[in-house]
Image: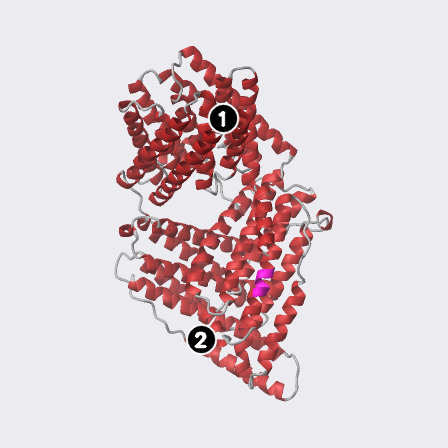
Amino acid sequence: MQTEQLTNDIKNFLYSYHFSNGLRTTISVVVPSLVFVAMGKLDLGIAMSMGALCTALSDVPGTIIHKRNGLIISTILIFLTALITGLLVPYPILMGTWIALSCFVFAMFLVYGIRGGNIGTGCLLVMVSILGETNLTPQLTLLHSSMVLLGSIWYATLALILWQIRPYLNVQQALGDCIIQTAKYLELRAKFYTPGINVTENYKEVLEQQVIVNEKQENVRELLLKRRSAQQGTTSISKSMVLIFLDMIDLQEQIMASQTDYNALQDDFKNQEVLEKFHVLILEFAQELRTIGLAVASGQRSLPKTNLRYEMEKVKAIIADITLKLPTLKERTRTIPLTNILQNLQDMAQRIYNLHRLTRLERIKEDTVDPKLELSKFTTSQKYDIETFRNNLTFESHIFRHAMRVSIATVLGYSLGMIWQLDRVYWILLTIIVILKPGFGLTRSRSIQRLIGTVTGALFAAGLLYLTNNSTVIFISMLLCILGAYSFMSFQYTLSVFFVTPFIIFLLHFLHPADLHNATQRVVDTFIGGGIAFFANMLLWPTWEHNYLPDYMTKMLTSNRKYFETVMRAYSNEAVSITEFKLARKETYVESANMMSAFQRMLSEPKSKQKKASQIYHFVVLNHALTSHTATLGSYSLNHGVQFPRPEYREITDFLLNYVDQLLLMINPVTDVSAPSTQVHAFDRLQNHLEQLVARRQEEINEGQGPTATRDEMLETKQVHDQLRAILSIVRDMAKTLSNS
């Protein structure tokens, strides 16, 4: 089992965007240097490689229009930065001013999102690399800048050609990764059925994984839905990806719809084997999803490995056996949550089989995307105008404060390097630029990761250079380090730095042999740059997450309120469009993930800045449970329809919505807000009606009757009643949590 898991992990990495991006970047960086080495002009080759490397940073997944425009803008700005930096290198005061200005402007590019931020980082890296050149005359500066420009054009051309050859590759990789992360989420939820599990602790892992799943879903939306003409045309492969993604979003809701009171479940069935059976069964579901994810990422077809229906029948038999041992119908209702979970798994199994089918392209010719679903509404737009930049030129903007920190820290690093006459001052600046992030927590973790990666990487490089002087061995090692550095850069930073350090040291070995000195200097400069970055983020207008958490909490709860309101319309015979329902669901997932991300960032900050952490975490867990119970109601109405609507549902819905409105006032109160009332008589009437249905059904059983309308109404009413009761309990707990905080 472990061997199979390791094999799947390796396949997942090789089929991922990270590896293909690393391979593409490695080729674009290595080829120019090899060509110019053969010509005896390695320095020009390195300048061209640097242009390719810096331009590659802007090439993040997106539509072909965004890719092309990003590459063009990046190419122009990188060339101008290289040219101006080269001309100012001999003049320290002008150079310091240029560093301050360019660092501020390019750090502000974060207002344009990930692509904009990466373009800015690429420009800063080329500026730092030019600082490492010595004795640059205007003529040499123009020559080196031209080579940087040529490298940028070379990478842009290569990237666009590869996109033309495989236009769906990025989409397949992103979609496959999304499915695999959803499988991990399902595995974590399977732990709730492990006897003796600490439910509270497991929730933390579930919520952290939910953040990752949401990020992956947003990536796929950007790639797949924003430019339908590019990825969602009439071809089988484009249609299949859209259908797979839509099914995956619905599957995510069904996973959340399995929500129940896990502590009560553990108490009721702690001595039964049924919970462990559920645990094993759900893990098999997760494994099927992994198989589908790998197939999608690699562009292959997938086939089921497990007969899920057969496995579910075995669990169904165990539930039936438990039910038969209970003497009365009222006691047997305790097994209804188990039956509901199994029913939800049956719906999930059908969707998983459909996902397998959708990977076989010839099977989807008759399938169509629901025309009622307005896919364009599910994407967000990013404005790339000067107005966005200008609106952030205020200390109210955390990006503005970040840009100021970068500017001051890099000027300080440059000044110290000049005063101490360090050989490679650009390493200090490189460390500051790469480590310094808008949030304190990320900067601190990046500092630690970079120091660990640098020290271990330097030791590895020094050890290899001590053992051999064989140029071929060192060159091959350098190539492998380049591949590792760019493959792991976006998701395993420590490992990426570990590979980057030997790559630079080996490169300097060929340019200026001074092996141990290079390794030592690299470590020293990293410590200096890391220290400056750390203290800059601590002292210069620091951004502490606890100041922003109330706003995140408000958005999270507001979106959850809208989701609940939209779902409950079906229980009052009100019309709800599929687009409206899914938009409300998407917004809830997005805001919940944003809240959890902010909370995780706060936990990485100093203890003194972690305000009310336990209460906030409890609130986030309750919000997740609220979303899950709402998803259960939504999934039921979509898959089975509401056959027996009750007037109590509308009254309870209005009461719960008003309750949530009071909670929103309690999050950041202007005046004292008391806890809302907890009484609603509609629950009593619904409870009485349910008891009457149970009694009537008991009479039918005594008379030997099989399935009847009474049975169906009892089951539906029990399902809705339990979910609404659970939601009432959750909002009450939310009120207590806010009162205590």
34 left or right, relative to 526: right
The residue drawn where x is 43% and y is 25% is: 126
The residue drawn where x is 67% and y is 43% is: 237
Q: Position of residue 540 (x, y in %)?
A: 27, 38
Q: Position of residue 483 (x, y in %)?
A: 53, 34
Q: Pick the residue in front: 308 or 332.
A: 308
Q: Position of residue 62 (x, y in %)?
A: 54, 38
- Residue 293 in the image: above or below residue 58: below
Task: Look at mark 1 in the image and give the residue it sits on.
Answer: 469
| Secondary-structure class at tag 2 | helix
In magenta, the rendered stretch is 280-284
Is residue 282 on the magenta stretch? yes
**Kind of residue at badge 2:** Phe
- Residue 316 in the image: above or below residue 627: below
Q: What whole-number distance in Å separates the C-alpha atoms at marks 2 and 1?
A: 81 Å
Q: Pick the residue in front: 23 or 7.
A: 7
**Kind of residue at badge 1:** Asn
- Residue 235 circle label: none
237 left or right, relative to 504: right
The local crowd at label 2, few if under 14, some if 14 to 19, many if 20 or more residues have their Cα within 10 Å, is: some
Q: Quadrant of residue 202?
A: bottom left
- Answer whether residue 641 is visible to the viewer in this image: no
